[in-house]
Amino acid sequence: MPEDHDWEAYKVPPTRTPVADRTTSAPNPLTFVQTFFTYVIDAPVTFVREWIEQQQAKNKTYYYHQKFRRVPDLSECLEGDYLCFFEAECQWRRDRMVDQEIVEIVRERLGACKQREGPNQFQNCAKEVELLKQVTKAYQDRYGDLGYHGNARTCLMKQKHRMMEERKAAQ
Amino acid sequence: VPVRHSSGHGKRMFIIKATKFYDTRFLNLLRFYIFLTGIPAALFIMYVNIFIGEAELAEIPEGYVPEYWEYYKHPITRWIARYVLDPPEKDYEKQMAVLDMEAKKTEIRLMELEARRLMRHRGDGPWYHYETPDKNLVDNSMKSTPDN
């Protein structure tokens, strides 16, 4: 069963369910439904799940996120040094995947904020909106129109053109 | 005269339909051959998932370098990465070795073309020599007297 996400990341405000004030002396039928659910579905499922967890706890294994060493960039490679090109290309692809995940996370944060706030999302989510705008603009600037065959070399050329534009605009 | 209407279950009819023999035979054979390996595979995967279980994500401990197969979650992928496939470092080095060989080959081919061009142009190399007959073998007797 997948674990719950980090509740601290998308801070959910405390739920404000009102205290029930009984106006009748008849028992609440929902208690019967709840007990039925607990005994028929919840307890067996939890029992099976815990039994499986016990079996799995005997041989516990861990997996880690791989950390890659930084290698010289494409701009630090000599011309004709194809091995350096290959390593820089691999590193650029990994960095691009990381940036895509970053954009995805910021987008999810905005979605969570909208879901949480409900009707007052336009006022209260301004920070997330601003962050997403900045992040997507930065991603578009760096990796934007490279196309399917974009590689580290085309990205470097795009950066060179951007710097040239900035220099021209600064004059 | 007993009639066809089935009130009181009337006359028995021999209803002529298209054959379902080939269809049922095909579906039976399909089910048989799929389940022949499908059921053992499903049982094996259920055993692995229940009794061995997936790995948990953890921070890399201090001073510990994980093996290359410890970067995967499911135990079967870990097993394949450990015993069947090459470590990714070796794979990387293999790719770089191919690139290196190809780069050296292109370099040598370019140098060969350059050498050929220069030898053809300057004519001082061992290539582009065409054998011509010796000067002393030429018979000048027909040109030695002007009135021949």
Image (spheres, helix red, strand yellow):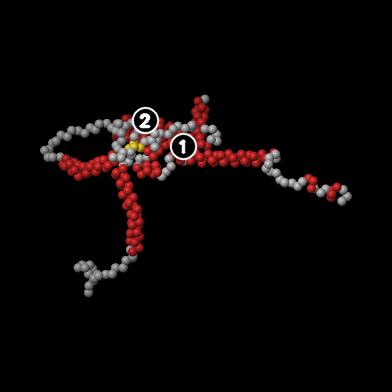
Residue A103 coordinates in the image, percent (x, y): 39, 34
Query: How many circles with numbers are drawn on the protein?
Result: 2
The disc placed on residue A90 is 1
Q: Nearer the viewer, residue A79 or A60?
A: A60
Please tell me whether mark 2 sits on a helix, a strand or a loop: loop
Which mark is nearer the camera, 2 or 1?
A: 2
The reply, left or right, for residue B40 in relation to residue A155 is left
Give me the residue at 50% from left, 25% from top.
A170
Q: Which residue is mark 2?
A: B62
The disc placed on residue A139 is none
- Asked whether residue A33 is in view, the answer is no
Q: Height in image: A71 above or below B148?
A: above
What type is the residue that disc 2 sits on? Glu
Give me the residue at 21% from left, 34% from top.
A17
The reply, left or right, for residue A1 in relation to residue A94 is left
Q: Label 2 lies in what chain? A: B
The residue at the far bottom in this view is B1
Local packing at callout 2 (Cα closer than 10 Å; few below 14, some 14-19, many 20+) is few
Residue B22 coordinates in the image, percent (x, y): 35, 63
Give me the residue at 38% from left, 32% from top.
B64
Q: Nearer the viewer, residue A137 or B67?
A: B67
Residue B1 coordinates in the image, percent (x, y): 22, 74
Q: Quadrant of the N terminus of chain A?
A: top left
Give me the residue at 19% from left, 68% from top.
B8
Q: Label 1 lies in what chain? A: A
Residue A3 coordinates in the image, percent (x, y): 30, 38
What type is the residue that disc 1 sits on? Cys
The reply, left or right, for residue B3 in relation to residue B25 is left
- Asked whether residue A56 is in view, the answer is yes
Q: CA distance from mark 2 to mark 1?
A: 27 Å
